[in-house]
Amino acid sequence: MKPRPQWQGSIVGGRYELVSMLGQGGMSQVYLARDKKLKGKRWAVKEVECVGSDETAFLEEAEMLAKLGHAQLPQLVDYFITEGGYGYLVMDYIEGPTLQDLFEKSQRELPIKLIVQIAFQLLDIFHYLHTLQPRPIIYRDLKPSNVMINQHNQVRLIDFGVARQFKQGQTSDTMQMGTIGFAAPEQYLGLQTDARTDLYTLGSMLYYLLSGGHYVYSKAKPLELRHDEIPETLRKTIHFLLQDQPQNRCQTAMEVKLRLRSLSPETDQLVIESGLKVASQQSNTSDKLIVIGGLFAGVGATFTAITLARLMHALQIPNALVEQPTIEPDLYMLLYGDRHAPSPYMFPSDHICDPSSTFTTPWINGFTTWAPINPDGFQGNWQASHAFKLLHMLKKPIILWDVSTEWEHPAVQELCYSADEIIVIVDSLPGKCDRPRSRQRIAQFTSYQQRGKKVHYIANGALPSHYRMEWQDSFPSKPLCTLPIIARSEVVQAVWKGDCIQDQPQYLDIFYEALKPFLSEILTDESLNQFALQPKKSIFSRFNKRG
């Protein structure tokens, strides 16, 4: 679309004087305008030609923008169609260059740290758009020229001309497909677009920025060969974003954030705001998120999570055990929180959902940080974004997340998409394993495995050998470990004393041997050797100490 002749100095809508052109695309122009009514006020005015169906598209964009309430998205203040057949959107004026401008000015080489920072901000914006109710918004046209950067490196996403509201069940789109070089395959084919389409365009843009300006469709070599300093986590994530089939990509913006959590620019600030201290001890392991739950209720998921936490403590690896806020409270009572939790104590999940609250001392037991939920139950609306904040607030090399049987909860599914390891606790009762819900969950775990996730089955309790093979064959993979049967009386006695039975030397050794196959999957030999070096206290040491 060519700009109208004699546009400069003209007044539209009776009050907006067009001063200069800010940008131009195939379907529109954006002008800097001076407000004749509010002296000194400047606006960005987008002009589009409205003929026939174009008028409907214009009004849809205006109504969409009017619903947005995000600080990093355009704020619409006015819109109208003139008698001459032109539509105008009046938006707040954002001062600053576009990402494309910065990219060209820096000879097409931006710092990786800045690119990651921009990606995290865009993911927050996409999470907001994709979770809008009653209908999510799909942006569909992410590219460097649609991203503005202010002097504080804050991102603003502009131009919603190709965006649309998502309609469940619709098989194809009718609007423009986006920008060649950044658009997802389904946009070229005119198929239905959804949140995963925006994530593909993010991957396309990251590839473009990290490769010196090469487009994905014309790549001659993998990204790691174009830039050898790109962190492996970032490379792998971009690979998942750029899968041709939407089901093979990262599924949500929050999943991408969780995958990139070790690179998050928010980490240090969140730790400072939370008041938590980062352990100074160095561990011989990379950051890992381990999701633990039961195939069905009462199978011992929380007990297993506590056991792993205390084994990590024995190995001198800082760790945290988080209780999923949407499950039935259990952890606080098992740990005798009234006796052992610091005073004053605020439950981390409560603090995450109420940032105005003052966070108090974290509950630390040796190398383990406990993050239970309030025994009265969690009262808020827990979302995946809350989980991400809690992960970074705790910031430990190993985070164990006990989900009980909440596998279907959206926030838990987000965690599973991004988890390094998924542990499913099972027992040998064939009737429970064969329930419809259990079979559905096994199918769900299989889908995670097909996406490259590590899913481990751990059996709670031994089974006679002549039944074991038949039982194990019912799972997609053989249980990796078998937890020993511990007399319930011993466990109850420890709880009543306010102790972890897992800390008792004779049981700690048993649990270590039982879970060593899993520990070997996630820890280095050097880390595992720490267990053998730990001084083992005698069960009678407490009496000797008193004597």
Image (cartoon, rainbow, N blue to C red):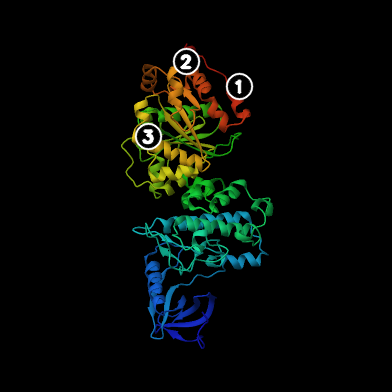
Distance, label 2 to label 1, CA atoms, is: 21 Å
Distance, label 3 to label 1, CA atoms, is: 41 Å
Depicted 173 relative to depicted 298: above or below: below
**Disc 1 secondary structure class:** helix
Q: Name the residue under label 1.
A: 533
Residue count near mark 2 (Cα–Cα under 10 Å), binned few <14, some 14–19, many ≥20: few
Residue drawn at (33%, 58%) of the image: 134
Query: Which x, y percent locates residue 144?
Result: 56, 64
Look at label 3 and name its amino acid: Ser
Mark 3 vs mark 1: in front: 3
Task: Pick whichever of labels 3 and 2 is earlier in the sequence.
Answer: 3
The dot on residue 542 is 2
**Disc 2 secondary structure class:** helix
Task: Pick whichever of labels 3 and 1 is earlier in the sequence.
Answer: 3
Look at label 1 and name its amino acid: Leu
Query: Which x, y percent locates residue 432?
Result: 35, 29
Q: Are marks 3 and 2 in contact (CB under 8 Å)?
A: no
Q: Give the total of numbered labels.
A: 3
Look at label 2 and name its amino acid: Arg
Query: Which x, y percent locates residue 73?
Result: 45, 64
Residue 168 relative to residue 207: left or right: left
Residue count near mark 1 (Cα–Cα under 10 Å), binned few <14, some 14–19, many ≥20: few
Q: Camera-side residue: 237 or 523?
A: 237
Distance, label 3 to label 2, CA atoms, is: 44 Å
Q: Camera-side residue: 28 or 547?
A: 28
Depicted 464 relative to depicted 115: above or below: above
Q: Name the residue under label 3.
A: 438
Residue count near mark 3 (Cα–Cα under 10 Å), binned few <14, some 14–19, many ≥20: some
Q: Camera-side residue: 63 or 541?
A: 63
Residue drawn at (51%, 34%) of the image: 319
Task: Pick whichever of labels 2 and 1 is earlier in the sequence.
Answer: 1
